[in-house]
Amino acid sequence: MSKPDLLRRSRRRWILALVLPILLIVVSLYSIVDGAIHIPFADLMAVLSGQQQSVYRTIIIDLRVPRVLVGMLVGACLAASGALLQGVMKNPLADPGIIGVSAGGGMAAMITMVMLPQFSYLLPITAFIGAFVTAIVIYVMAWENGASPVKIVLAGVAVNALLGAVTNGIMVVFSDRVQAVLPWLSGGLNGRSWHHLEFMAPYALIGLLLCLFAIQPANLLLLGDDSARLLGQRVELQRFLLIMLAALLAGAAVSVAGLVGFVGLVVPHMIRLWIGEDYRFLLPYSMIGGAALVVLADGIARSWFDPIELPVGILLAVIGAPFFLYLLKRKGAVRS
Amino acid sequence: MISTNHESTPFSNPAIEVEQIALNRGHFQLDDISLAIPAGKLTAIVGPNGSGKSTLLRIMVQLLQPDHGMVKVQGRPATHYTRREWSRQITMLPQLKEALPQLTVRELVAYGRAPHKRRFQSLHSAEDQAIITQMLDWTGIARYSDRMFHTLSGGEQQRARIAMALAQQTPIVLLDEPTTFLDIAHQFEVMDMLHRINRDTGLTIVMVLHELQQAAAYCHHMIALKNGRLAAQGEPLELLTDTFIQHVYGMNAAIQYEGKYPVIVPVIPHHSGGISHDHRNEHFANHQR
């Protein structure tokens, strides 16, 4: 089976390079069309090409399109963040949601919104700081020649519980102001509009672009610390910077969508199974896959449970949690 | 200490000089070790388990910093090299402990080019590609280049990892137990290959070996450690005597020669119930049935 190995993988890389963007476009169109009000495809095309005034114009341009774009960025950021954390912590279970990085960003964002509302334009930055501090705490607690899967999950449970308690405490103490942040807290894209997009897009795009510089160090870290050092790498510094980048990405996602879990776990895993661990492919493919997953899940969560709009975070947890259990169970997926 | 060289100036231009190295990390301990590694030769580091062989190797390549003493490479203190210069000067093949990512053999070997690339450059130049191909040829694994690394046999995997170290094109390569987990045929394959590469290119190779006979037969220089101290060093075939085995391993053995190949024959005391020849034959006979 000498040739097939490489052939199969490079063929899959080509196929996915075509399929993933098409998938993203298809699910985006679906997510724009479907919802409480169904939009005929002809009207959608007319509005998107700017030809004709349509009764649906407001719904499409003001509600659905920005929501899909926010969903794309959130999904891309979470998937890239998960792919990076998995490599840096040498741990297949490292997902910003599971290990508490998102929760750290969420708590910081919550504090900002409730206690310092005048600074809420800095939300992505405070979420990033919260996510980063949490990531470093977990890294230090669980690290011992690579973060062992058991330790990292335990650390994540503890950190998640602590952050959840603090967040709940804030909600009780500032119960008068919590109403305003509830939609954010449930982890969804309800009512996300151009204003939200403008406010998180710079951070998200900077993070996604910086991933270009993460490819080579992340690939070298896969070989193990000793080998990376012998190849001239500054292992500690690079790991620190990569964690920072993962936190920036998670923070950008959290600042606009609240706690959306499992995207960073499911997407990079599927991509890795298909095309291998090379970050030159893993990162961009995960971004597109994550974007497609969140947009699709949001479309479904919004329209299948009519008249209720389910927050996308809930639907993703319903898909993601069993997948997480499957990974834990699967032999060889988790080496301790 | 047993030595076959005159102590003051062992070699004219040593590749590595270790000067009064001491390190104490609980069970990792090295005590006042000074030695030199000859340039362009095969050097074996031998000694009992836990004698500090791997630790010494890690210090030589700066994965560990000693408490005292210093390492010089090509006459220049190791700490004076930049990280990049260092990774173009010397490298090491660690023991195979960590699971490697799922890569093809060629992708693995390509990692060795990292110190020669610009920062963040992830594509391989034509020169890189040529060097990768050359190393696959040298190590005799060119026909496996597109196979997944983890589907190879132990001997082939080891050769692929050696090819990666060679692709780094450092004048000095250290190998930590390159033959330990291989069967005897693959052990000789790897030793033959290293011998040939050393002869053809003048690469300085230092390796930790457990198999004393192979060490003596293939290497130009041998260093023996015991309890974190230098126990012996010199020309292997001169060094390898019954006194040496007794001194370093605390074991009674006689050295015999099959042609130029040394054979270590353990002296088994008769009263301690050692295996008699009759028993051994019976054992084999049982297995063959």
Image (cartoon, coloured by chain):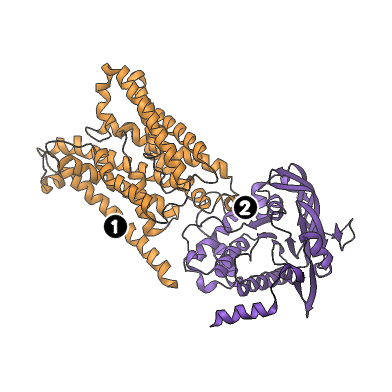
Chain colours: A orange, B purple
What residue sits 22% from the left and 49% below the top?
A: A27
* Above or below B279: residue B90: above
Tell me how far mark 2 sits from mark 1, CA to CA: 38 Å
Residue, disc 2:
A230
Q: Which residue occupies the foreground of this view, B114 or A306? A: A306
Between A38 and A129, the residue placed more toward the observer is: A129
Identity of the residue drawn at 44% across and 52% down: A279
Q: Is residue A102 visible?
A: yes
Q: Classify the position of the N terminus of chain A by image quarter.
A: bottom left
The number of callouts visible is 2
Seen in the picture, residue B27 relative to A124 is either above or below; the reply is below
- Is B8 positioned to the left or the right of B148 in the image? right
Q: Looking at the rendered structure, which numbered label has been put on residue A223?
A: none
Which chain is indicated by disc 2? Answer: A
Say which amino acid is labelled 1.
Val
Q: Which of the two labelled residues, at mark 2 and mark 1, occupies the earlier sequence position? A: 1
> A111 or B276, which lies in front?
B276
Q: Looking at the picture, which amino acid does disc 2 mark? A: Leu
Give the percent coordinates (x, y) of residue A139.
49, 38
Dot 2: element: helix
Give the left or right position of residue A140, taking residue B234 as reference: left
Tag 1, which secondary structure? helix
Other-residue count near label 2 (Cα within 10 Å), few / some / many at <14 / 14–19 / ≥20: many
Question: Pointer 1: what residue?
Answer: A19
Question: In which chain is the residue bearing label 1?
Answer: A
Q: Is residue B181 left or right of residue B252?
A: left
Q: Nearer the viewer, mark 2 or mark 1?
A: 2
Q: Quick check: A250 above or below B253?
A: above
Please provide percent x and percent y for residue B130: 57, 67
Q: Residues within 10 Å of mark 1 (few under 14, many from 20)?
A: few
- Residue A24 horizontal/vertical position (percent): 27, 50
